[in-house]
Amino acid sequence: MKRLASTGFGTACVLFLQGCSGWQSALDPKGPAASELAWLIWFFTALCAVIWVLVMIALAAPLLMRPRTRSEPLALDAGADHRKLRVIVIAVGLTAAIVVGLTLLSFFANRTLAAIGSDAALTIRVTGHQWWWEVRYEDATPSRILTTANEIHIPAGEPVRLLLTSTDVIHSFWIPSLAGKLDLIPGHINVLDIRADKPGVYRGQCAEFCGAQHANMGTFIIAEPRAKFDAWWNDQLQPAGPPTNGEAKNGADLFLKRPCVMCHRIGGTPAGGTVAPDLTHVASRQTIAAGTLMMSRGNLAAWIADPQGVKPGSHMPVVELNGDELNAIVAYLEGLK
Amino acid sequence: MSSADLTSERDLPQRETATEGDVAPEHDGPRDTGMDDASLHRWLARAWRTPPGIIGALSSVDHKVIARRYLITAFIFLCLGGLNAVAMRIQLSGPQRGLIGPDLYNQLFTMHGVTMMFLFAVPIVQATGIYLVPLMVGTRNIAFPRLNAFGYWVYLSGGVFAWVSFLLNMAPDVGWFAYVPLSGPEFSPGKRADVWAQMITYTEVSSLAVAVATIVTVFKQRAPGMSLDKIPLYVWALLVTSFVVVFAMPAVMITSTFLILDRLVGTHIFNPAEGGDALLFQHLFWFFGHPEVYIIFLPATGMVSSIIPAFARRPAFGHLGLVLSLIAVGFLSFGLWVHHMFATGLPKLGASFFTASSMLIAIPNGLQIFCWLATLWDGRPVIRTPLLFVFGFFFIFVIGGLTGVMLASVPLDLQVHDTYFVVAHFHYVLIGGSVFPLLGAAYFWFPKITGRMMSERLGRWHFWLAFIGFNVAFFPMHLVGLWGMPRRVYTYPAELGWGNINLLISAGAVLFFLSFVLFTFNLLHGVLKGVPAGDNPWDAGTLEWATSSPPPSYNFTRIPIVTNVEPLWAERDALPVATGLRVDVRELLISTVAEAHPDIREKSATPSIWPLLAAIAVGGTFLYSIFTPWAVVWGAVPIAVTLVGWFWPKGDPEDEE
Amino acid sequence: MRPGTAMLLFALLTLAACQREERDTRPQNSLGSGEQPTPVTTLEPGGQRASASDNKAASFEANAFHLSEGKRLFSWFNCSGCHANGGGGMGPALMDQKWLYGSSIESIHATIRDGRPKGMPSFRDKIPDDQIWELAAFVRSLSGNAPSSAAPQRNDDMMPHPSENRLPDAATLGKSP
């Protein structure tokens, strides 16, 4: 039994370390909010572990005692019971004190979290859809308002305000290494302030069950230095570049002729659908299908050829395309940097 | 009873062996006063028997028969829910596994939750209460026995309804708490969410029926002398639970009815565009949903409070403290529902209030734990399988309780809400806090129910298999939750590195499932080949051990008189008894609420087929109502007919008056 | 006899429920060919020629999932731009009992696919064939031609008209052509 326990503990440690290096882990904080929370998690865990061990010792203690000799269960030792009562009163008092302490601790942690975004200069509206994220960068100048999908670029080291809402069902926006989660609820707008201390890519995914493809509703926050972020914003505002070679040109025509155009928008072309992710600079993203597949020619082709195989139940329909048509469309999309 | 009879009893002085009804009306039949045991048995067995034949079996109102049916049905649902879980764990054992698609997976986890919460956990704790409460308070049948039978039939048909719909690919697929708008009219086409809504309303009817019967049994049918301070802790737990049921269940019935109104009638209660609100659903649901946890947990604490004294060989330490903390938990459970909704963006100060109230409930629960530990501190207890499961309960439930404290903290909850951490937490609380005590209770009371012992050796194997399987399956979930794995995902990408740990979890789940296979075997082995148990195999102190195992249909030959909270320990030779009840008809002794003075004699209902027919009528109405609201109108007709049949005057003296 | 009846009832329920609850997201693999038949001309003035009957038609019409998909696409593809939630505006109303080209699902499919005179555009190749069938099935449900147990319920929007599952059954009213 003991060996089993120690083996179990060893395995747990290995697994634990493995988890800490993840890019979607609450224990691997990369921003002030998540750091505060990670500290809180560790503190609570340590305190709870101590309490648990004490209770287990108290539980194990009678096993080591001699068996009761008195045969009559009602013959009680009044003095012993009185001592026990005193211990219990102290234990309950301690419980109450710990509970009050933890309540105050979480109240002040909550205040720290609320203070993070008080001077946020950048506001991003994130709208949940079944099963992708619409991302809109707000700006006082209408021509600088930018709509993209699934990947959120932010300037590193600056607080950013996210306005969260939904047009269909309730989703929940959660980037574990940056901040706690907050729901996207139709009819409500929730405000989440985040800050990434260092440049990096942080993954998150929908955390409130939202239907068939809840499991494949990922998102990324890409924190970059301010200059790089500004450049990215400016690039994204440009309309899509014209197709460069014959195959891509063919693909652009097909995009407009076939069902793609009914739902997707590509800036600078007649394609103006708003019910599906904006594809103006789709090739500049790292993933497709809301964080499900890495961006590559093969994955693009797989996704377009059989979206219902990759994400069964998603709203991307199966479109009949022959091989040449598929290649042409992929070639076109691949060029939309 | 006539009023003359009533006053005559009140005027009588309270004597050690209560005498009552000395002034008997003319039409009275034979009494048990002065009758010898053999003829008393003959009379009582004839008055209280369940009629023979299939119709007789279906019209039984014996609380023990009904409870046995409840227990077996709930156990079957437990196995079905467990199979759901195993299927899910196989799908999740590796990244991107293609065994089960999202459509089926979503139905599986919804059915798992619905089955475990509504068809297993609540019914089985109530069923244990139906069996044990009348025995523990020393009465011959539960109050409102026909309502109790009706409750079982409603529960059975509700459960069958849910599982038939699963076989028809029509099971709800929106999670056991079915948040709108996902479960609303726009995003859940077909009848799946309607099945959820009506099945919930339906099974809660049965829950309410049992709760009412339990409350009245405890308040009015206690054996003479069992004043409030001498009520066994298990009965207290069931009493508090029943009050929680009475106040919590209507909230969920309203929620599910609002949902089906939105879906079927086209109301806009949850539609933000027309002034409704999706969050209203969550408030209503969790106003029920959090007490629900305590509905499942409190009876289990009662079981722990029964098992520990029997093996620690002393009465529970701090009886009053335990009772008060039960009541405190019952009250507080209604004040912390919002901690399920911290991630919805509520005002921060309001959320902090619910942090405080959620943390507060740790105090009475802590007090309970301390009292149990103090009970055990009197020397090495007798270690038998029931106590092993209680030890398992401590080990697991304390972890669940402490992670519960973590979840109560608003900021911390934002990281772990709706992740596998929460899945781990509530399985630690519900399996540790309720299933382990239930398993202990199964070993503890099995001899009372069947008259035979379960195998101790298999029991120990079962315990270690369940204990290890459970911890291997659920402890790693805390970690994988902190690493970012949300709950209710049918698959996950390999890149996130959750593969190995999920494989470990699945292996643990299989072990845990196997422990139940072993348990089933032990149950069957016990029923068929167990060693005969005798009346009181554990030498425990409460009244259910005073009668034979299994108890006769009339429970007690003579109604015992209670002088101590553990009456069998206080009166080693023979319990004092009260006499004066009629033996040719079903008659109960009704006592006063606080002091349990004998008050009046009251008839108990005879077997009847009408509760079954009424349940069928109600069931048909509910089934029909997922298709059209007119079902309520047309269904009212057969329901009215069956109720008229049920309550048709029988020509008893009471009715004639 | 009683078990037999129960079994029969169970089997009937199974069939009924399966059809209503099935959520086949790739129907062309299991039903029909998925190919759109080549039309003789691209324009069919006042054409009475319906699309070839397809076994999708029947299975979509009684299927809650496909009907609700049709309802979703109706708004996504801006059918409301002309037909205004079925009430009619620039285009004819879809929720009354008047059918310019017949009420069969095949003719509605042909209308969407090939277009009709006076403004109804052709969505050939713009909408996958399955989705055209879904839209056609939904359009029929707008006038009470779908079983109410499968017809879509209200949306979480402002209410333009009672939801499709609340409409009186066209067949029982005897107004259906």
Image (tube, coloured by chain):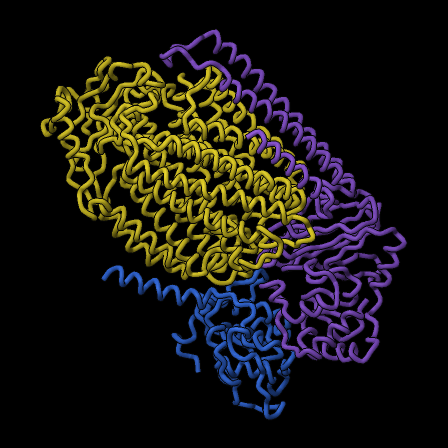
Give the vertical position of A238 relative to B591 (above or below): below
**Residue farthest to the right, as pictured:** A227
**Residue farthest to the top, as pictured:** A79
Question: From where the camera sits, is residue B358 visible?
Answer: no
Q: Is residue B521 left or right of residue B337?
A: left
Give the vertical position of B556 relative to B618 (above or below): above
Residue drawn at (64%, 57%), measured in percent from left and top? A216
Q: In this view, does B551 lie to the left or right of C124?
A: left
Chain B tint as drawn: yellow
Between residue A232 and residue B453, name the one nearer to us: B453
Chain A tint as drawn: purple
Residue drawn at (58%, 77%), measured in percent from left and top? C129
Residue B252: x %, y % from top left = 47, 45
When asked about the image quadrant of residue B382, the answer is top left
Total marks placed: 0
Residue A16: x %, y % from top left = 68, 39
Q: In this view, does B485 lie to the left or right of C61?
A: right
Between residue A91 and residue C141, name the one nearer to us: A91
Question: From where the camera sits, is residue B128 visible?
Answer: yes
Chain that appears blue: C
Residue drawn at (52%, 31%), measured in percent from left and top? B332
Give the vertical position of B79 relative to C141 (above or below): above
